Amino acid sequence: MSLDFSTKRMRATTVAIPDPGLLQRFLSASGPTSAFIRRGEGFVALGEVARFETDYPDAADVWWAEVADHIDHDSELPGAYGTSPLAVGSFTFDPDRSEERSVLVVPEVVIGTRGGQSWMTTIGPRSRSLELPPSGERLVAPTHLDLLEGSMSERIWMDIVGEVVALIRTGEVDKVVLARDLVVKAGGPLDARWLVNRLVNRYPTCWTYLVDGLVGATPELLIRRQGGLATSRVLAGTVSLDPQNTDSLVKAAELATSSKDVAEHEFAVESVARALEPYCSAMNVPESPSILRLPNVLHLSTDITGVTDPGSSALALAAALHPSAAVCGTPTFAARDVISELESMDRGRYAGPVGWVDSFGDGEWAIALRGGQIKPETPEQIQLFAGCGLVADSDPAAELAETKAKFLPMLQALGLAD
Ligand SMILES: C=C(O[C@H]1C=CC=C(C(=O)O)[C@@H]1O)C(=O)O
């Protein structure tokens, strides 16, 4: 829907509501529906007042600033983080080389919970009903699933890893993040709500996202802006855990002392710190990473914080930080060229920013990892993605095993793994 800014104003109303319970129960079967949930907090969004399809996040940021300017907002929770009208979006990894378009949607209804406070924000040309929408519809598990090879076989992918490593050893690039895909076909249309529900339960410390058929649970936060504070969680460097998780202490020590993983991580931290610096008056970049533990893997993790200039929205910051070396490589443009030449698939919105921005410019943008894309033209199928950072001493077989660990959350959500 396009908006005529010269004449149209919109009205938004935010009301405090009692604890609505599990947010994902409000996702709707019909019509646009999005989610952004972590540790039971966040929101689900229903309906669509306006939509902007674009190639570049900066253009979406300009569009949203103009839309937000045309909203009159009444609130029972003035100033509470994330409760003002917002837009939910997801952006392609490489807009110059993708068939997919990026999207920013202004939903009609947002139901959220954060810090013990729950709210509903409605938005539209007129005042809307302030009744909570129906929830708790029974979800149906996907059936008759087939797990298919993606754009290339494991063997070919490992050969390409070998080629990229050889290229890194010549000094042409320092790090390249190479991904691969798998396709899962079901007997009927897949219900993204089923996947969201499973991911929220199994990976509560990740950001579970659903935007326009892109669904997953990512551990990596590109940027959060809350008032004047910006935070980014940089991940790079991984070891897989065994299914019983009995080996995590040994694996943590292995990861923390692996020069290959530490090098991979340092490239990623440096790229985020460098891109964020121009927007910050002060910044804290920890000297060494900590270990982030997930059910399937351990990651090296660094939380960067900065005091930001209020003129840059969360979406503008996401545009500046993307693509970090956690999903692209170093140097950025050379790594992106290697990916486009050798990866042999369209990443679409995998590894791009996914999240939200509100009318104050606050918001959260995660990196769309550990997920997949359901397309409207093939609703019975999902394309899953996973990638690995390659440096000079990466080993193809170990990298393939790492992608398998990274596919696990989605395969579990689909019922294809325990
Ligand atoms: C590119 C992915 O992960 C990134 C984030 C964390 C650890 C990574 C790694 O160790 O390679 C990757 O940089 C992915 O999950 O598809």
Image: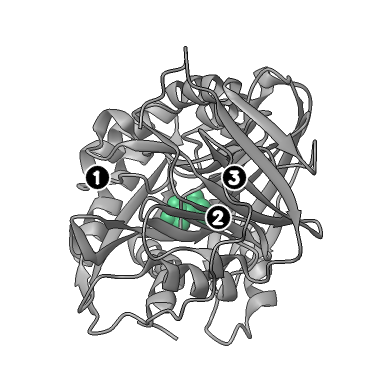
Q: Which residue is at 24% across, 51% downward?
A: 160
- Which of labels 3 and 2 is toward the front? 3
Residue 77 occupies quadrant = top right
Callout 2–callout 1 Cβ contact below 8 Å: no
Q: Amino acid at mark 1?
A: Asp
Q: Which residue is at 34% across, 28% downward?
A: 55
Q: Amino acid at mark 2?
A: Gly
Residue 3 occupies quadrant = top left
User: Is residue 393 among the parts visible in the rendering?
Assistant: no
Numbered-mark total: 3
Under tag 2, what secondary structure?
A: strand
Residue denoted by label 1: 346
Residue denoted by label 2: 237
Tell me which numbered mark, 3 or 2, is placed earlier along the sequence: 3
Quick check: 187 left or right of 334? left
Under tag 3, what secondary structure?
A: strand
Query: Residue 122 shows which numbered tag?
Result: 3
The answer as to whether callout 2 falls within 8 Å of ligand 1 is yes
Task: Say if 274 sits above or below 266 in the image.
Answer: above
